Image (tube, rainbow, N blue to C red):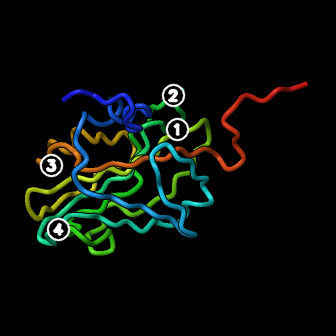
Amino acid sequence: MPINSTNPLVVGGVIGDVLDPFTNSVSLRVVYENNKEVFNSGELKPSQIVNPPRVQVGGNDFRTLYTLVMLNPDAPSPCDPNMGEYLYWMVTNIPATTGTTFGQEIVSYESPRPTSGIQRVIFVLFKQPCRHTILAPGWRQNFNTRDFAEVYNLGLPVAALYFNCQRENGSGGRRLII
């Protein structure tokens, strides 16, 4: 499958660093409080993402189930991502045409709180082959999305979104000290 260099998931390094190339085949909408919708390569501050977002999954048959993972490949710092991929949230058995509130929360939501640099926060949606019993990993750090998908026979993602996040007063650039 050719990699489209205009795809924001490619430009942002999500495809490559975290995911293999895939075709978006199901709609995924993620909205935080105050109607802060997640758009690829957009930016949200930690104060905007304290509580879990509303997540809407597309599809056309509610008997089809999905798994959503939310992670950060850049933790604790893009220069030294020794905890990446850091798992913030996992919800399984989400029926198509519904959202995460209809699924089973396996790993409770943890609000991203980056301390260094601009970090990518990624939502990945997988179509499940059947109703799964998915076990919570023993820890959140060093989660591996590709290995997880292989262990649970999920295949390639069907949708993904990401946003950039940095500490509340971060500017993303160097500061000039005079």
Q: Is residue 136 left or right of residue 131?
A: right
Which residue occupies the foreground of this view, 154 or 96? Answer: 96
Residue 76 is tagged as 1
On screen, residue 141 versus residue 63, left or right, reads right
Tell me the quadrant of the picture where the C terminus can be found. top right
For disc 1, the neighbor class at 10 Å (few under 14, some 14 to 19, many from 20) is many
Q: Which mark is residue 154?
A: 3
Label 2: which residue?
80
Q: Is residue 52 left or right of residue 46?
A: left
Question: Does the CB distance between marks 1 and 3 fall below 8 Å?
Answer: no
Residue at point 50%, 65% (across, down): 32
If the image is split into quadrants, where does the N terminus sit?
Answer: top left
Instruction: Please report whichever mark, 2 or 3, sits nearer to the chain's N-terminal start.
Output: 2
Question: Which amino acid type is marked by label 2?
Answer: Asp
Nearest-to-viewer mark from 4 and 1: 4
- Identify the disc placed on residue 60: 4
Q: Position of residue 38 (x, y in %)?
A: 47, 55
> Which of the two discs, 2 and 3, sits closer to the camera?
3
Which of these two is toward me, 120 or 138? 120
Considering only order in the chain, which callout, 4 or 3, is on the residue closer to the N terminus? 4
> What is the C-alpha distance between the residues marked 2 and 1?
7 Å
Tell me what residue is drawn at x 37 percent, y 32 percent.
10
Considering only vertical position in the picture, is 42 above or below 174?
below
Mark 2 touching mark 1, by CB under 8 A? yes
Residue depicted at 31% across the width and 30% down the height: 4
- Report helix, strand or loop for mark 3: loop
Asked if residue 2 is positioned above or below residue 103 in the image, the reply reads: above
Cα–Cα span, label 4 and label 1? 38 Å
C-alpha separation, residue under disc 3 versus residue under disc 4: 19 Å
Seen from the viewer's position, the closer of residues 30 and 2 is 2
Nearer to us: label 3 or label 4? 4
Q: Secondary structure at mark 4?
A: loop
